[in-house]
Image: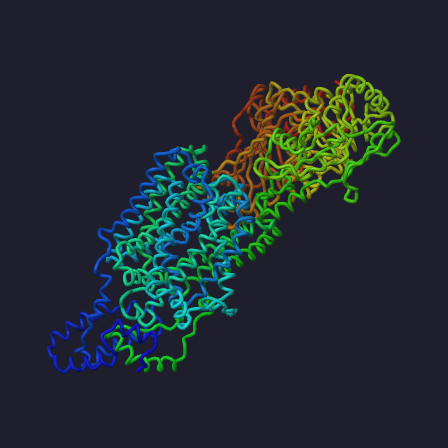
Amino acid sequence: MPKPRGGQRQQYNSGGSSGSRFQALNDYQNDHDDRDNDGRKKERNNTRRVSFKPSALQKQGGIKSRLAEMAVRNRLEDDEDMDGLTTNTLYEDRRNSRRKGSPIPKGKFGQSLLIISAGIGVYYRLTGGKQKTAKEYLLADRGMGITPVAFSLTASLMSAVTILGVSAENYQYGTQFVLINIAYILATPFAAYLILPVFYRLKTASVYEYLEQRFGYATRLYASLAFSVQTALYMGIVLYAPALALEAVTGLNIVFSILIVGLVCTFYSTLGGMKAVLITDIFQSVLMFASVFAIIICAGIKAGGLGPIWETAREGGRLEFFNFSVDPTHRHTFFTQIIGGLGVYLSLYGVNQVQVQRLLSVKSLKASANSLWWSLPVLMVLSFTTCFSGLCMYYYYKGCDPLLEGRINSRDQLMPLFVIDTMGHIPGLSGLFVSGIFSGSLSSISSAISSLSAVTMEDYIKPWVAYRKKKELTDARTTFYTKILNLIYGAVCLGIAFMAGSIGGLLQAALSIFGIVGGPLLGLFTLGMYVQKANQKGAITSLTIGLAISFWIGFGQPKPPIPLLPLDTDSCPASPTSLITDIFTSNLLETVKAEEEPHYFYLYRISYMWYAVIGFLITFILGIFFSWLYELLGWDLNDALYTDTSRTIIKSDLFVPPIAKRIRKKQMPLVVVTATSSEIGNNNSRTPSFVEEENAAPGLTKSYTNSTELTDISIGVIQSGQRYSKDDVIRAILSAISPDIFIPHYWRTEKNCVVFFVDDYAIAQRLQQIERSVQMSDGYRLFIRVRASCPIVSVDEEFKEKMKLVMAKRYNAHTKALDLTKFHADPDFRNMFVGLFRTPVMSAALDIIQKNIPDLEALNLNENNIASMESFKNVEQRLPHLKILYLANNNLPSLAHLLVLRNVPIVDLVLKNNPLRQRYKDHALYVSEVRRKFPKIVKLDGEDLEPQILFDVNDTSTLPKAQASFLCDASGADIIRQFLEQYFMIFDSDNRQPLLDAYHEQAMMSISVPPASQAGRLHSFWKFNRNFRRIVNNEDVTKIRQLKPKLIAFTVAGLFKELDSSSNSGGDIRYFQRQFVIVPAGGGFCIRNEMILVTSATGAQARTFLKPPAVVSTTPTAAGTAGAAATVTSAAAAGSLQNRLQMNQPTTSAAALMPPPADVAPRQPDESMKMQMVQAMCVQSNMNAEWSRKCLEETNWDYNHAAFVFEKLHKECKIPPEAFIK
């Protein structure tokens, strides 16, 4: 049996107990001898066991409490001598003290708090803007002051969890936790000056909109969902805390406590919006501080000062500040609190929607940072006071732990019990404490509800409405939906609160949730703000892995018990628990120590303070790796990072200020002198360079030529990725150089800067001096760079006349070509600079060409620094005959600038050494894009291009005229034969890319889907057999459906058999039909419309296909018959058109041609029909009757085939002259 403790603890015990422990044991033995009534003995035992809660001891107590429970349970069941044990009256009073109701009549403090909080919500609903706009409802109209935001930042997350959890933490584990305040100090600059500026520039109610701009919409939804889960869990814990306190203090039903707090909080949050939340946070923060200070003051009075409290804590081993263990399994050490605290703080005050939403409700970025700094001392004072209140509780309960004594069920009820024991006799103080607990929970829950509503509205509802309704939500509807969301999340909060009782200690539970979810989210935001190469797929992958590992570590079971500092019941009043604990604990302790400790998985033993750091590192490091991997594989090129399609300008505002500044500087043009003034003015000088050189000397150069000072300077204003108007930029510059003024000339935009000219050298020097002193209204600074430039010229008549003389010298009348290469460097230009890159100069040159060289066919504009083709608008009217254009060694950024030339019949184009060439790594793609814009081009960059599928005819304006007979005009049939032969030659090849050039830019294509009954049978065809060379046999019918001056419509139909088929080893027979509409294009034709139909062959078609090959000719019945079909069955593959297709010509649209019926037998025409065919051949071919008959006989009286053979031989000049002699 342990010895009684002396000193101060024994003195305290003697004052509060009726005798020593040995005397209590003697009394127990006397009672056992005198009382033998079995019914009374059982009644006492039952009464005693109602107060004792072994389940609570097992959950919350240390090893000693669990052993005590085992001892009590075993001895009470086995030892008959225990039946007579009586309970000390003082013990019964202490045990049941919390059951006697609140010491405050009718709970006036708590009622007042709830009424005032609800009243604030009603007030802001009826005043000001009445919460009618989303900006006012969610961000308080961005008009809040620093003080309410600073207090709200503290009250939002450090609530009842702080008051109850931190005090209990210091009571049972010591003061090591208080070192987390050092982490708060270290982390605040990172949040205020690195993270906060990025969010403030977004001007949005949801911080997750940043993720959409940086990565994409999927990342935004994923992160906001994780935040919603985190916040909902935290709300449940915070709402459970005051209910637990009320139960301990007043005996009020815990269900009623949860309901009343949750409903009041939801009420004023829904009505008053963000303004009500911030103002109530101030009021509730004051009550929180008042309650904690009241506890410390009362404890100090009872102890005779704060010194004894500190000394008692030191003796009890509670004072610990410098535990430098690097073992991550130790719960609290110096490193866990500093490093782990950094992760927790930044995840809360850096990227958490609850806190950032408050920081965005102030007027400016500076005020937002000040709010964060002012919240730091408020947070630290609350942290220090709650920590010290835990030491006050240890002083009071140093020899009699309430949990081991059985007076409470949880360590988190220590402070409410302490308030009852020390301040219960003072009217109002217990109520003040209850109000403080209420205040902490109300502030946190209202903040969480407001943030969840904002995230749901901005990240889910608004995008969904914009996608489905194709319109934006109005402010009124947004506010209405947000209020509905407040009600919904209030109900969710209530539901989770009822489940929070099964979670362990409040403080560890809250910080664990923040670490498990907040750490990976912090890693995601850090990845986006610091790493340029990070992309969406890498971010989502790393976040998924980070959350999975964090949840695994945080919720994996079993976890080892947390070692407690010494707690005992030596000074407790005599009770069954204390007596039996002392008698049997020592033996059980020796037994358990002899046993080997169970083995726990290492990750489950890691301190909860490392959760945020682990999640952060996993997400950040894996995000970098997977982003690199996906970019390497070409799966994600991070297009969301750039502002333009050329991927040259990065959104610098998406990064923390130091990196954003470096990006802007990197994207900014170099400060160099491109050409000195002497070079510009000297007639015999070399051509000024338009390419910036890194080794050129920065600054201005000033020289004199012919006593004329040239002071034309260009100023590039880097706009930091922002969109500023011209007036705003000029106004800011004029304000910086006041009282000097200037007039900007030739304002233009070049990538991420604007360029303009000034005509005063002194002004240029002044602008160079204020390089970084120009500040915009939103706090950003403009970067100004000054460089020497070409002189400003006035395009007057004298200037045009000079240009005309030089252009006349460079014109070659024989070739109709004009060479304007390096036009500005022509020696005839004295004391003037004629740069064709300037729009007025180029326009003047085109006007001169239009008036004096209207039949110009070739124009050379090489090496003129041309960056825009704006001057070439309506150039098809100025230069209608232009066919050759050279634009090499210029600064054209993309082919889109050449669209102004799309109506010019250019056949030879040179674009070498332009930035647009760098956009196409594949030369074939580059050629294809150029051809799309210039269909008639045959030569590009000096190389002849392969001919497109265009067929020249004699008359390029109209198609061959249709004949009023069943016979096709030879020229029309020849066009179609050539077209199909070349088309299917490419179609059957391995590379079908050239077929793109055969289609019109606005071509329409369709594929007819067969009925559902045949879809399954065609699956193998669509998947494996798209190449006509993979057929065993084919039977094609070609029919001209329309032949008009502006289009030809014809159909190719037939049967084919697949070589390989998964459904039929012998191959499936298919019927196909392709309808083409071709129109004139340049010197040939292109496809305007194409329709494809593939179905399974019918039974009759299949039988026809399986018959031996035979030639079937359709014999016309009359000269005017229209729509008759001619069919040819080829024996083998798709070779030449002659072996593959048979042409027929109707005059107008006819029905689609089908293969002939199976029962049609081949037959020869009779003599009358042969005479008609000979006459028709004489008319069409101009041959005499003898040769016409001979041609038909050699082709087995197949008229279409005979006409085709005649045209082919006639072109080859193989028909003798006597055939045309009549």
Q: Residue 1146, located in which quarter of the rendered image?
A: top right
Q: Is 506 left or right of 689, judged from the image as shown?
A: left
Picture coordinates of residue 833, whole percent (x, y): 81, 27
Q: Is residue 985 visible?
A: no
Q: Nearer the viewer, residue 213 or 1058?
A: 213
Q: Is residue 947 visible?
A: yes
Q: Quadrant of the N terminus?
A: bottom left
Q: Nearer the viewer, residue 708 or 1149?
A: 708
Q: Is 1058 left or right of 806, judged from the image as shown?
A: left
Q: Nearer the viewer, residue 850 or 702?
A: 702
Q: Is 996 left or right of 64, judged from the image as shown?
A: right
Q: Residue at x 52, y 32 (%)?
A: 1154
Q: Is 1 left or right of 1125, judged from the image as shown?
A: left
Q: Residue 796, located in which quarter of the rendered image?
A: top right
Picture coordinates of residue 188, whole percent (x, y): 52, 52
Q: Residue 956, located in which quarter of the rendered image?
A: top right
Picture coordinates of residue 992, whole percent (x, y): 64, 41
Q: Is residue 897 above or below residue 21?
A: above
Q: Is residue 968 above or below residue 785?
A: above
Q: Nearer the viewer, residue 719 or 294?
A: 294
Pick out the residue farthest to the right. Answer: 684
Picture coordinates of residue 938, whole percent (x, y): 74, 32
